[in-house]
Image: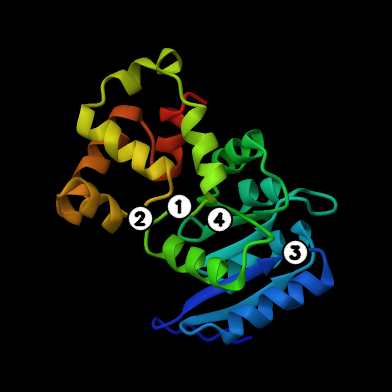
Amino acid sequence: MSSIPDPALIRVAVVEDDDRLRANFVARLERAEGLRCVAAYSDAEQAMAQLPEAAPDVVLMDINLPGKSGIDCVRALKPRSPATQFLMLTVYEDVELIFRSLQAGATGYLLKRAVPEELVDAIRDLHAGGAPMTSLIARKVVESFTPKAASPATAQLTPREREIVEALAQGHAYKEIADRLGIGISTVRTHLQRIYEKLQVNNRTEAVVKFLGR
């Protein structure tokens, strides 16, 4: 694992207490083109102490860690490493865990049984501005939204702005949203800035959580 930054590579760290799984994740990352594993930790405490210095672009975070959970770890690390994106890995398909992860600062959520290609694609998608989730989890997130739960701030969104936040909730990257709506990426970003201002949030994860009434 290299600690030398290379702008051509996506730098990834792994936080997983199972030794075999952690080794498998590291091996997958090292075999994947354009990815580099820069650190691997066995528990949240070790990650919280050392991960900011490793400065990964993406972190694969196990939810069910011994001691502090992966959600607690993300909550502690995100303010210290705001540019780092956290992809939660778990065996659970629990919508409450999804929202707790999003509220803590995670941007993606994937089942551990995902095949290697899905994991690598999720890392690239996350790094490109998406919010990867399994189709079942994305559907649960969308279905959990009800209009009556909308806050006054959410009610201020235009139909186009609501379309964009709904697309983010489904895990689409900015380019996918632009193609889907027939607009440019710069226009998507402009809409997002207006959405952030209206919802009084700072990033896409907070916007999705607030939009979904949590």
Amino acid type at mark 2: Ala
Horizontally, residue 117 falls left or right of residue 190, namely: right
Q: Which residue is mark 1?
A: 131
- Residue drawn at 59 percent across, 65 percent down: 52
52 or 17, nearer to the observer:
17
Of tags 1 and 3, which is closer to the observer? 1
Of tags 2 and 3, which is closer to the observer? 2
- Residue drawn at 71 percent across, 51 percent down: 63
Q: Which mark is residue 16?
A: 3
Q: Secondary structure at mark 2?
A: loop
Amino acid type at mark 4: Arg
The residues tagged by marks 4 and 2 sit, at their Cα atoms, a distance apart of: 24 Å
* Proximity of marks 1 and 2: CB atoms separated by less than 8 Å: yes
The residues tagged by marks 1 and 2 sit, at their Cα atoms, a distance apart of: 7 Å
Q: Which residue is mark 4?
A: 80
10 or 166, nearer to the observer:
166
Amino acid type at mark 3: Glu
Which of pointers 1 and 4 lies earlier in the amino acid sequence?
A: 4
Q: Which residue is mark 2?
A: 173
Q: Using a 10 Å C-alpha cutoff, classify the residue at mark 3 as few (fewer than 14 neighbours), some (14 to 19) or many (20 or more).
A: many
The residues tagged by marks 4 and 3 sit, at their Cα atoms, a distance apart of: 20 Å
Which of pointers 1 and 3 lies earlier in the amino acid sequence?
A: 3
Does 101 sit above or below residue 109? above
Of tags 4 and 3, which is closer to the observer? 3
